[in-house]
Amino acid sequence: MWPQRVDRAEKGSTDCMLEVMYKTGKLCGSRIGKEKRAQGDQLRGDSLRSLGSSERQVAPVHRRSRQQLQGRPFKVSVRLEASGSSNSFRLLVRPQTGGTFKPSATPTLAAPSSFGSRTSNCGQDPWLAASLALPGFRARCRIAATLGIQCTSKRSCAGRPDQGQDPRQERLAAQPQAGRRSAALYVHWPYCEKRCSYCNFNKYIPRKLDEDAIRTCLVQEATTLLKLSGVQRINSVFFGGGTPSLASPYTVASVLEAIAQNTHLPANAEVTLEANPTSSKASRLAAFQVAGINRISIGIQSLDDTELQLLGRTHSASEALGTLEEARHLYPGRTSVDLMFGLPGQQVEPWLQQLQELLSRCDDHVSLYQLTLERGTPLFAQVQRRTLPSPDPETAAQMYQDGREVLREAGFRQYEVSNFARNEALSTHNWTYWQGGQYIGVGPGAHGRFVPQGDGGSLREARIQTLEPDNWMKEVSLFGHGTRKRVPLGELELLEEVLALGLRTDIGITHQHWLQFEPHLSLWEVFGESEEVRELQSRGLLLLDPRGLRCSWKGLAVLDTILLRLLLQLQNAWENRSPPTFKVTESGAASPRGDSCFKYGLD
């Protein structure tokens, strides 16, 4: 149940804040459900579909004078009434003791079609309009958190209020276990305002965008794949693209609500949105926060306007820094920035100056990405035609090494090859990838890795959704999802992924974590007697000890070279292993070796 709270007017104050709950004519705070005082509510069905008969909704904060309250709890009845137009409504209240309904302090509220936009009507409260327009639980949690109350739900809040622990530390401390019915979820928004000159991602520049249609399909595919996966908990959600900050906050909230309705989505789960500066003004960032986003990743890429033009970015350096400042204010401790290096003609010292300036303004997470020239991109063509110099790999390597040093001196931990954090601000979503956890991909071209338990499967599958948005939407409408390709992963393939991804992190692969995927072939057995591994250890690049297998800080810089040797050693050890008779799959069934990608004990 929702907590009941009615504030008293403080001595000497001129008004007080009263917060009530609305549920099918019931006010949780005033317990007048039996009287059904709100049965006469006239709601516009389409614009207020989030206020369904089974939904609770936070009603607006209403101000009453201290003289009327006289220091006692003040209970009210609430009525939502359609206003003159079909896309707005107003809220009326009256004392529980009787009287007539009167307009609240917020007489006119925008319907979802105008959600997130500014209004010249000084009587309108955009935060309140957002809370009423958004579907379901996460919007209520956001408003409740703003008001300082604790909300609980058997599905989305685990039935108890949060105890104030940092969820990132708690989740990252425990290594994910194979077979646990949890996953991360990635949502791909495929649209952009403009294609960057270096980008070959699955993205499109729409002439006309039917957001209602793609929203419906994202919700439908998320629902279908969650049921298919059989997962009982989503630990994190990541909206990527494309440019997902171009989507409406209502779309983001709809997807999150669909997730919460089909599995357990903790109220403190990390929910990240990738954002470009030109589509991330303060008002829009605030609207995304109401929708349920609690972490922002800003694609700054460069603080040099000439380089930004070369990359085809639509923002300037000053716009990027302005967006960063606004994001830090709204998402303190949860704002990440991306910076690229290794551009054609780029030099070490000017780039390091950009990094230093960024560190003077950034939050607690920085990602450094080296430019990769992808065939088919305008930048690749310019280099091929020699209108631009080819990026110098030695210069790029020096940038990376010097950048790591600068970040370490600034108190950042390099917890992954490209990612740096301080104050434990690690990305828990990406951590799921690097630890070999399951993840579900929703949207055009999204990738996923999960066991389709709802379909009776026991093998983890690599799944790819249909790339082109229109075709993807047709398939989702017909089949409930747009999965174009699904490939069961063999045991060796999964172990190769665990090795390649796990070694990207500073903790590497612990013995316990490895045994969750392969209980019959330990890290010692695979790598302990290898001359290649001994050579890497003697050069200070690799460590194999009682903690597990991991790269040194020096070794992370040359991980690609190390991985080639280790993958070959794993393949040799796999071919020469002595197979046990039986194992247990992730779904819990015993089967001969070779049938499943996950297994636990059992000779």
Image: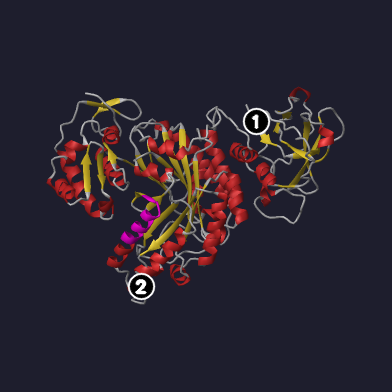
Q: Quadrant of residue 128?
A: top right
Q: Quadrant of residue 301?
A: bottom left
Q: Amino acid at mark 1?
A: Ser
Q: Residue furthest right?
A: 99
Residue 491 in the figure: left or right of residue 27: left
For label 1, count other residues whose C-alpha is less than 10 Å away and answer few (under 14), some (14-19) or many (20+): few
Please give the range of residues in magenta: 400-413
Asked whether residue 337 is drawn in magenta, I would say: no
Residue 140 in the figure: left or right of residue 324: right
Q: Residue at x 36, y 72 (%)?
A: 345
Instruction: Judge by depth and name the residue closer to the eye, 197 or 216.
Output: 197
Residue ID for mark 2: 345
The kind of secondary structure the magenta stretch mainly shows is helix
Label 2 SS: loop
Where in the figure is residue 527, as x and y percent of width and height? 18, 41
Q: Residue at x 61, y 49 (%)?
A: 287
Residue ID for mark 1: 54
For label 2, count other residues whose C-alpha is less than 10 Å away and answer few (under 14), some (14-19) or many (20+): few
The quadrant of the rendering that contains the N terminus is top right
Where in the figure is residue 294, as x and y percent of width and height? 53, 45
Q: Residue at x 26, y 40 (%)?
A: 495
Instruction: Judge by depth and name the residue closer to the eye, 126 or 71.
Output: 71
Q: Earlier in the sequence, mark 1 or mark 2?
A: 1
Where in the figure is residue 77, as x and y percent of width and height? 78, 31
